[in-house]
Amino acid sequence: MAISLVLHRISDFDAWRAVYDSVAPLQAAGGVTAQSVHRTAGDPDNVLVIHEFDSVETARAFFADPELHAAMQRGGVKGEPRIEFYD
């Protein structure tokens, strides 16, 4: 099992969450086996997303998908997200 941690700032949580929820099929096709979303206490526009995958290679391929990057932009992600991979 592999885990990705994605930390990013967003413009508006509700707008971001709507886009995040809309890409569930992209997540499934990209190999996401479990996910969770967390907001920093006291800073609701600082979001941590945890995804589980079968392998780090699958995780890296998922995050290289241009469709995912477009969804992040639609969701109001500010700047470049911090993405880390663990196995």
Image (cartoon, grey):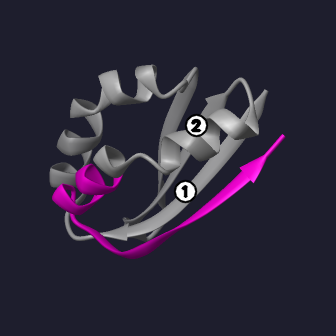
Given residues 20 and 43, the one toward you in this image is 20
| Mark 1 → mark 2, Cα distance in angstroms | 8 Å
Name the residue that disc number 2 marks: 51
Q: Residue 6 carries which label?
A: 1
Judged left or right of residue 26, residue 76 is left
Q: What element carries label 1?
A: strand
Judged left or right of residue 9, residue 16 is left
- The tally of labels here is 2
Which residue is painted at 55% across and 56% down in the image?
6
Coordinates of residue 45 in the picture (x, y in percent): 34, 67
Q: In which quarter of the image is the C terminus?
A: top right
Disc 1: CA contacts within 10 A as few (<14), some (14-19) or many (>=20): some
Which residue is painted at 41% across and 46% down in the image?
65
Which residues make up the magenta segment? 69-87
Q: Is mark 2 on a helix, strand or loop?
A: strand
Given residues 35 and 74, the one toward you in this image is 74
Q: Quadrant of the N terminus?
A: top right
Kind of residue at disc 2: His
Disc 2: CA contacts within 10 A as few (<14), some (14-19) or many (>=20): some
